[in-house]
Amino acid sequence: MPEQADREIPATNLSRLVDSISEYLKYQKEEGVYSIESAAPNSPVVPTPSVTRATVETPMPDKAGADTLQLINAEVRACKACPLCEGRTRAVPGQGSSNPEIMFIGEGPGADEDRQGLAFVGRAGQLLTRIIEAMGLTREDVFIGNIVKCRPPENRAPLPDEMEACMPYLKRQIALLKPKVIVCLGATAVKGLFDVKTGITKLRGTWMSFEDIDTMPTFHPAYLLRNASGKKDVWEDMKAVLDRLGREPPPRKK
Ligand code: URA
Ligand code: SF4
């Protein structure tokens, strides 16, 4: 039977569609896309979720064949280089400024991130937002990414092989973004970048260097949700980061 163009959409489908469109728009905004080109003649006015996902990006190396964030994003979304691809809903390449002073690196997507395709949007992400804002910055000023781009099952820590398989993407992101400072959020981020066995409690607060970029290890915000006493340590570390950038934290709201 031919498709009926004007058939009614059931209310539940409609609400799912609206959810998925608003998620898509939020996602586009985080990717820096603020306008939408008008639809081609005869194409549906409202994209279906599957169309939405397939047309998120048009990966095109620039004329010189240089690497771009868009290309990395598209490769990540299609990646099958490790078994974590099997359990993902969406891969999470990371998002934010393309010219950030600070790059935050976490462990890997959780359930909320997997659903939305965006890094640090769940509870830990909301705490990270507050930390960034306490520093006088916004999420759009920094880049927020992870060691692995696909959600590990049951939120377990990524395995060494998975981290290794995913690391080329992070290295390409770092090479393009050229942040002045990297902040490693938690032990997994440190393990991903450095060959160290020392725990995060010992390492936090001391500068390290990753490919000549000053790198500050600190506690993961998810740890802070369970151990509020670590917040003052993280704040010390973030003040050290600001100091290194020649910035000062804004006066604290009373
Ligand atoms: N925890 C992480 O390490 N990364 C996220 O993106 C979310 C939670
Ligand atoms: Fe590819 Fe990384 Fe996802 Fe593994 S975690 S499938 S290496 S993008």
Image (spheres, rainbow, N blue to C red):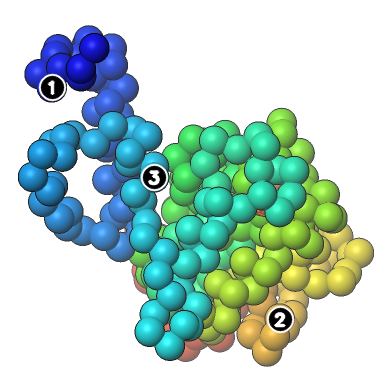
> Which residue is located at x 54 percent, y 59 percent?
75
Say whether residue 56 is visible. yes
Tell me the crowding category of disc 2: few under 14, some 14 to 19, or many 20 or more residues within 10 angstroms, Cα based. Answer: some
* Front residue of this view, candidates 37 and 241: 37
* Front residue of this view, candidates 42 and 251: 42
Residue 160: percent from left, percent from top:
84, 55
Nearer to us: label 1 or label 2: 1
Q: CA distance from mark 1 to mark 3?
A: 21 Å
* Front residue of this view, candidates 140 and 250: 140
Q: CA distance from mark 2 to mark 3?
A: 35 Å
Question: Quick one: label 1 or label 2, which is nearer the N terminus?
Answer: 1
Q: Which residue is mark 2?
A: 210
Nearer to us: label 2 or label 3: 3
Amino acid at the residue labelled 1: Ala
Image quadrant of residue 11? top left
Q: Secondary structure at mark 2?
A: strand
Residue 65: percent from left, percent from top:
47, 82
Q: Secondary structure at mark 3?
A: helix
Q: Which residue is mark 1?
A: 5
Q: Quadrant of the C terminus?
A: bottom left
Q: Which residue is mark 3?
A: 54
